Image: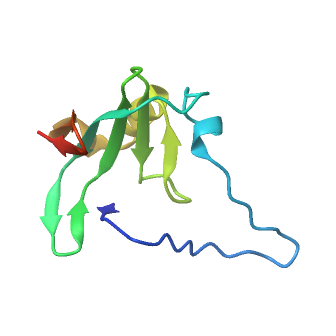
Amino acid sequence: MLVSKVTVIRPNAEIDEDMTAAVTSMRFHVLRDPDGTNQLSAISLWDLVSVAEGLTCSAAQLTLANGQEIFIDPTYHFGLRVGGTEQKAVWHDTWPAAAEMKETILALVERPGSVDYV
């Protein structure tokens, strides 16, 4: 999976004639954050490699200040599978090399006017 910073999101999904494109907030469907006050506290990346385009990794996890974990599994047959700790367990069960992969944790530290990572 390639992780990089972009200025514009360009979805490349194929939409059939009888389909309608829609956009929705993940906050309402995935995050336990009804009032929008939660914050990202750490990012975990497995098998991290720096490349010219950004970073590549075999999986990613976002840890929120409220303790919620959002796991991003790129090994799903139809694309990325986003879920909680249960999806991380599925990734470990179905991806044999996962047990040996190095986990890199970027802990985010809020500073006045910016956010840094350590």
Considering the image in quadrants, where does the C terminus appear? top left
Task: Residue 64 in the image: state x and y as whole percent.
Answer: 38, 29
Pick whichever, 80 or 97, lies toward us.
Answer: 80
Q: In which quarter of the image is residue 110?
A: top left
What's the coloring here?
rainbow
Q: Is residue 88 left or right of residue 32?
A: left
Looking at the image, the residue that sits furthest to the right is 18
Residue 101 visible, this orientation: no
Task: Residue 26 in the image: state x and y as whole percent.
Answer: 58, 44
Considering the image in quadrants, where does the N terminus appear? bottom left
Looking at the image, the residue that sits furthest to the bottom is 17
Q: In this view, does 91 lie to the left or right of 21?
A: left
The residue located at (42%, 53%) in the rendering is 75
Residue 82 visible, this orientation: yes
Q: In this view, does 110 lie to the left or right of 90?
A: left
Tell me if residue 5 comes above or below residue 93 in the rendering: below
Pick whichever, 97 or 66, lies toward us.
Answer: 66
Q: Quadrant of residue 51?
A: bottom left
The residue located at (22%, 67%) in the rendering is 54
The residue located at (47%, 34%) in the rendering is 87
Tell me if residue 67 comes above or below residue 14 in the rendering: above
Q: Quadrant of residue 5?
A: bottom left
Task: Residue 60 in the image: state x and y as whole percent.
Answer: 33, 45
Looking at the image, the residue that sits furthest to the top is 67
Total residue callouts: 0
Tell me if residue 85 comes above or below residue 114 in the rendering: above
